[in-house]
């Protein structure tokens, strides 16, 4: 017969463990929460502002943050998450560069009893227990807003409306959502045709290079719209259009996503026709959620940041300074 430890011993262990747990909770109330944050890179003005927002909010709320920049490499993000687990942080947060490849490392965090927050972009997983909450933008909605603007702008045009798309990082949630949402809205109107699409990685340099190739490949008169998944790629494309003697916003209508100050300035000048906001200032929400999760509260699984649209049909003078 299997020898069982005397009940008193089991009780002692249970009490000791729970006491340790309580002691840890009590001391953590005195000690600052330690948050490990893996940021995907610094590829765009949006990302720079997002990182600033995260760090500033950590400082403001007294959370100790270990901030790692993965420089656009998911392998660096996985290394960072593993270092946070080894360090036994209270909570992990990260912006996944792409949607897949996270289940194993998130399983390790779960086994270590460390809650995980997903911020900005989303992961593709069947196991929702791997994360406590996801605070993202609604990228599909952003894409749909871009499509709806074009339907309004070209409502009186019967001829084809040919669109060039500068897409974001392949397999990333914003690139997927902004592409799918855009197409879902426009598929009801056969005059809209995406004649060319290429991944520009959300980078200004790649936006410039792709636009240069597009103007070699197509007669500019056959391009009616540039739909760009972020402002930085848009700025690169605008440079090339101007160098080619084209008038951005007139010869080729432009829809851009993010809403940095420079894109709003271009909107007011008529160089860009529509700017879809993607809000980088999620830092405060991240820190407030982190405190609730570490305190043992159950929070909503999916949360979205609030965003709007600015376009040539609106009151452009009322747009407040963006701050980034
Ligand atoms: C969207 C974010 C995107 C921005 C780009 O939430 O992930 O990445 O739209 C940034 O500017 O590079």
Image: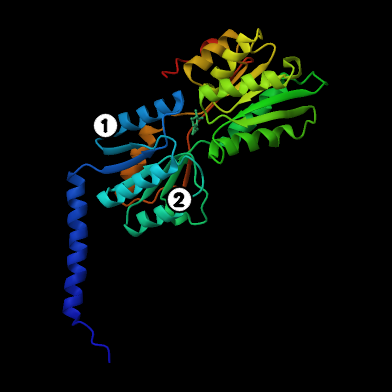
Q: Secondary structure at mark 2?
A: loop
Residue at the far bottom: name it.
1
Q: Quadrant of the N terminus?
A: bottom left
**Residue at (47% x, 16% y) in the render:** 261
128, above or below 52, in the image: below
Circle 2 residues within 10 Å: few <14, some 14–19, many ≥20: some
Q: Quadrant of the C terminus?
A: top left
Q: Would you identify the image quadrant in which residue 31 lies? A: top left
Q: Position of residue 252 (x, y in %)?
A: 68, 15
Q: Position of residue 313 (x, y in %)?
A: 64, 15
Q: Position of residue 218 (x, y in %)?
A: 73, 20
Q: Secondary structure at mark 1?
A: helix
The reply to whether the residue tagged 1 has its Cβ within 8 angstroms of ligand 1 is no
**Residue at (41% x, 50% y) in the render:** 132
**Residue at (50% x, 42% y) in the render:** 98
The answer to whether 244 appears left or right of 206 in the picture is right
Circle 1 residues within 10 Å: few <14, some 14–19, many ≥20: few
The answer to whether 60 appears left or right of 95 in the picture is left
The reply to whether residue 257 is in sight is: no
Closer to the camera, 247 or 304? 247
Residue beneath disc 1: 59
Task: Give the mark nearest the N terminus, 2 or 1.
Answer: 1
CA–CA distance between discs 2 and 1? Answer: 28 Å
The answer to whether 156 appears left or right of 176 in the picture is right
Q: Position of residue 191 (x, y in %)?
A: 79, 27
Nearer the observer: mark 2 or 1; the answer is: 2
Residue beneath disc 2: 102
The reply to whether residue 133 is in sight is: yes
Q: Would you identify the image quadrant in which residue 285 lies? A: top left
């Amino acid at each position: 017969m299997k020898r069982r430890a005397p009940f008193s011993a089991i009780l002692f262990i249970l009490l000791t463990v729970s006491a340790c747990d309580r002691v840890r909770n009590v001391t953590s109330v005195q000690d600052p929460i330690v948050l490990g944050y893996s940021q995907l890179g610094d590829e765009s003005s949006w990302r720079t502002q997002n990182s600033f927002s995260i760090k500033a909010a950590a400082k403001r709320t007294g959370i100790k943050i270990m901030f790692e920049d993965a420089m656009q490499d998911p392998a660096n993000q996985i290394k960072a998450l593993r270092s946070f687990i080894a360090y036994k942080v209270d909570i992990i947060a990260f912006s996944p560069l792409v949607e897949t490849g996270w289940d194993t490392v998130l399983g390790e965090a779960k086994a270590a009893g460390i809650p995980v927050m997903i911020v900005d972009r989303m992961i593709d997983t069947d196991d929702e227990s791997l994360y406590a909450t996801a605070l993202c933008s609604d990228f599909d909605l952003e894409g749909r807003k871009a499509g709806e603007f074009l339907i309004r702008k070209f409502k009186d045009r019967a001829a084809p409306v040919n669109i060039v798309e500068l897409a974001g990082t392949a397999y990333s949630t914003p690139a997927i959502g902004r592409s799918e949402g855009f197409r879902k809205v426009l598929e009801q109107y056969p005059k809209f045709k995406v004649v060319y699409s290429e991944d520009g990685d959300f980078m200004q340099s790649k936006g410039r290079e792709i636009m240069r190739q597009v103007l070699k490949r197509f007669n500019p008169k056959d391009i009616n719209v540039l739909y760009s998944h972020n402002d930085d790629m848009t700025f690169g494309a605008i440079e090339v259009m101007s160098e080619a003697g084209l008038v951005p916003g007139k010869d080729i209508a432009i829809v851009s996503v993010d809403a940095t100050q420079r894109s709003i300035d271009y909107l007011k000048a008529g160089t860009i026709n529509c700017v879809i906001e993607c809000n980088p200032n999620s830092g405060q929400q991240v820190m407030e959620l982190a405190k609730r999760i570490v305190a043992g509260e159950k929070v909503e699984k999916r949360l979205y940041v609030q965003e709007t649209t600015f376009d040539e049909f609106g009151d452009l003078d009322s747009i407040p300074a963006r701050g980034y």
